Amino acid sequence: MSKKFVWALLLAAGAALAQPVEREGVKFEPTAQVGGTGLEVNGACVRTRAIFKLYAAGLYVPPKSNSAQALLAQKGPRRLAMTMLRNVDADSFAGPLNEGLKNNHTEAQIAAFKPQIDAMNAALKAVEEAKKGDVLHFEFLPDSGTRITVNGQQKGANIPGEDFFAAMLRIWLGDKPADGDLKKGLLGG
């Protein structure tokens, strides 16, 4: 038996034994496919604001890591999956994302990302309202950029630039994350 074959068997066995991660009744499967690449759930947590539970989020990456810097530097397909825990209109959803971008980037970086931020906001406004139970995916596909889907339906065009996907991840994993507990959870803690 070749070493490659044995390694493939071990990975398959490990994936078969892996259990979903559950947060607030939302299950994040141990693996996902994005752009033909197998990803592992790195961690999951619930985003709260004040006393309200907004969404459960799970981060899928090719190699798992508990280092925000390592995850932000990763290349290739990745996914941030969210399941809404309450109804949120587009402006109330997009506003904190824009705030998170501003909190984790310089003014010059924000200015450089303006076309991508505008495209993200347009895609989110097309949603109008994310309803309790809706599943949103922010996925990076190397050939086409960041894809935003709601319940499997793409919203807007793909947003170019792997650097923009990393910028989006800084909303949750940056030095000034939207929610410290969520950052810890996405890092597998």
Image: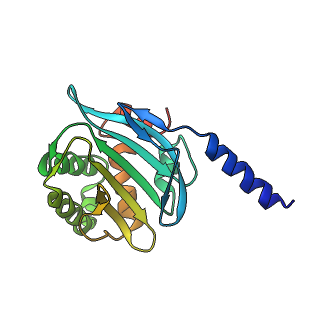
Q: Which residue ends up furthest to the top in the rendered image? A: 51
- In the picture provided, is 88 more to the left or to the right than 151? left
Q: Which residue ends up furthest to the right in the rendered image? A: 1
Front-most of residues 179 and 128: 128
Quadrant where the N terminus lies? bottom right
Judge whether 57 appears above or below 150 on screen: above
Residue 26, x across and y down, in percent: 37, 37
Image point 55% across, 37% down: which residue? 19
Judge whether 103 appears above or below 149 on screen: above
Residue 175 visible in image: no
Residue 85, x across and y down, in percent: 25, 37
Image point 24% across, 57% down: which residue? 107
Q: Which image quarter: residue 144? A: bottom left
Front-most of residues 122 and 163: 122
Image point 42% across, 39% down: which residue? 27
- In the picture provided, is 30 more to the left or to the right than 89? right
Judge whether 153 appears above or below 178 on screen: below
Residue 31, x across and y down, in percent: 53, 49
- Count of marks overlaid on the render: 0
Give the colour scheme of this rendering.
rainbow
